[in-house]
Amino acid sequence: MLKLLIKSLKKSSRLKRISKRLSKPLDRTNIRVLLDRQQTREKYLDELLDLCKSDENVFYLIKTFDITDCFLKTIFHALEKICAGQYAGGHYVPASSITYASTLKFLLNHFDGQNFSIKNYDHYNSSLFIAHRLIMYFDKGETGEVKF
């Protein structure tokens, strides 16, 4: 039990550090700084993916759904594009969403590789629904399956 708690604390600490780096806004006024920042950001995104794969439950989903690092990065970037790129409940939503099995499973069930999809919703409203649901999930400190 103590071993699991320590492992969880280490994961949370790493996630917090990586999230802080990934959530920094890009300065689009200086192209040189922007390019350097994008390279650094890519390094931290790779570190985030390593963290994801170190979790047994997340790794199981990755293998079960047969998803690649590129696909996980696509989900991460898609979340940022649909306005989920913000903090909620101490979590940077795109990073935490792919790092925990419950939220990753929710995303994998509603992402077709390009867009989020919720039954009876168009693309735009599906994206808003996903962003809102994940923000509320972390803001309220929910655990377990993401329900709606």
Image (spheres, rainbow, N blue to C red):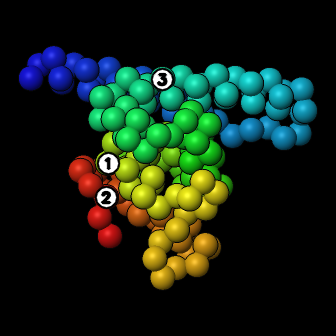
3D distance between C-alphas at marks 2 and 3: 23 Å
Q: Residues within 10 Å of mark 1 (few under 14, many from 20)?
A: some
Q: Residue at x 60, y 54 (%)?
A: 113
Q: Which mark is drawn over residue 128?
A: none
Element marked by disc 3: helix
Asked whether, in this view, residue 145 is left or right of residue 12, the answer is: left
**Badge 1 vs badge 2, beta-carbon distance below 8 Å:** yes
Asked whether, in this view, residue 136 is left or right of residue 43, the answer is: left
Q: Residue at x 56, y 59 (%)?
A: 112
Q: Residue at x 42, y 37 (%)?
A: 62
Q: Position of residue 140 (x, y in %)?
A: 30, 56
**Which badge, 2 or 3, comes first in the chain's sequence?**
3
Residue sitting nearer the eye, 72 or 25:
72
Q: Quadrant of the C terminus?
A: bottom left
Q: Position of residue 101 (x, y in %)?
A: 33, 42
Element marked by disc 2: loop
Q: Residue at x 42, y 58 (%)?
A: 109
Question: What residue did someone put label 1 on?
Answer: 102
**Which badge, 1 or 2, comes first in the chain's sequence?**
1
**Which badge, 3 or 1, comes first in the chain's sequence?**
3
Q: Quadrant of residue 106?
A: bottom left
As drawn, which residue projects farthest toward the bottom? 120
Question: What residue did someone put label 2 on?
Answer: 146
Element marked by disc 1: helix
Q: Residues within 10 Å of mark 2 (few under 14, many from 20)?
A: some
Question: What residue did someone put label 3 on?
Answer: 50
Q: Quadrant of the N terminus?
A: top left
Q: What residue type is disc 2 on?
A: Val
3D distance between C-alphas at marks 1 and 2: 6 Å
Q: What residue type is disc 1 on?
A: Ser
Q: Position of residue 132 (x, y in %)?
A: 46, 65
